[in-house]
Amino acid sequence: MVYHIVMWNFKEEVAEADKPALMAAMEKELNALVGKVPGLLTVEFVKKPATSSTHDIALVTTLEKLEDIKAYAVHPEHVKVADNYVRPYVCNRACLDYESEA
């Protein structure tokens, strides 16, 4: 199993009042990718990180194998969600991918 973890901060111009609705839409659309993107097993959208965190939101996904990360990145359904629901509102992306034998 492979973990693909991505974290972002909201852009400064995103109003606090808009963040809950944006996070709800991100969560819904990202969760909907399971079953559409081959190799994507699970999606967890983190919208309430601990106060010690350096990022506002995160995405924790599991995939079958390392090669699936590349396929996920360019899959049309993922690109559509990223371009419409995520990228317009976030910055400071950080990513960590790792393989687990568990």
Image (cartoon, helix red, strand yellow):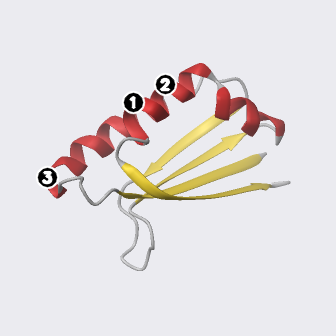
- The residue drawn where x is 45% and y is 32% is 83
**The quadrant where residue 28 appears:** top left
**First reached walking from the N terminus: tag 3 or tag 2:** 3
Q: Is residue 33 visible?
A: no
| Quadrant housing the N terminus | top right
Type of amino acid at the residue the image marks with label 1: Asn
- Say which element carries label 3: helix
- Say which element carries label 1: helix
Residue occupied by mark 1:
84
Frontmost residue, 80 versus 21: 80
**The quadrant where residue 15 appears:** bottom left
Q: Is residue 88 visible?
A: yes
Q: Would you say the residues marked 2 and 1 are in contact, meaning their CB atoms lie under 8 Å apart?
A: yes
Q: CA distance from mark 3 to mark 1?
A: 19 Å
**First reached walking from the N terminus: tag 3 or tag 1:** 3
Type of amino acid at the residue the image marks with label 3: Ala
**Residue 55, placed above or below residue 71:** below
Type of amino acid at the residue the image marks with label 2: Lys
Residue occupied by mark 2:
80
Residue occupied by mark 3:
17
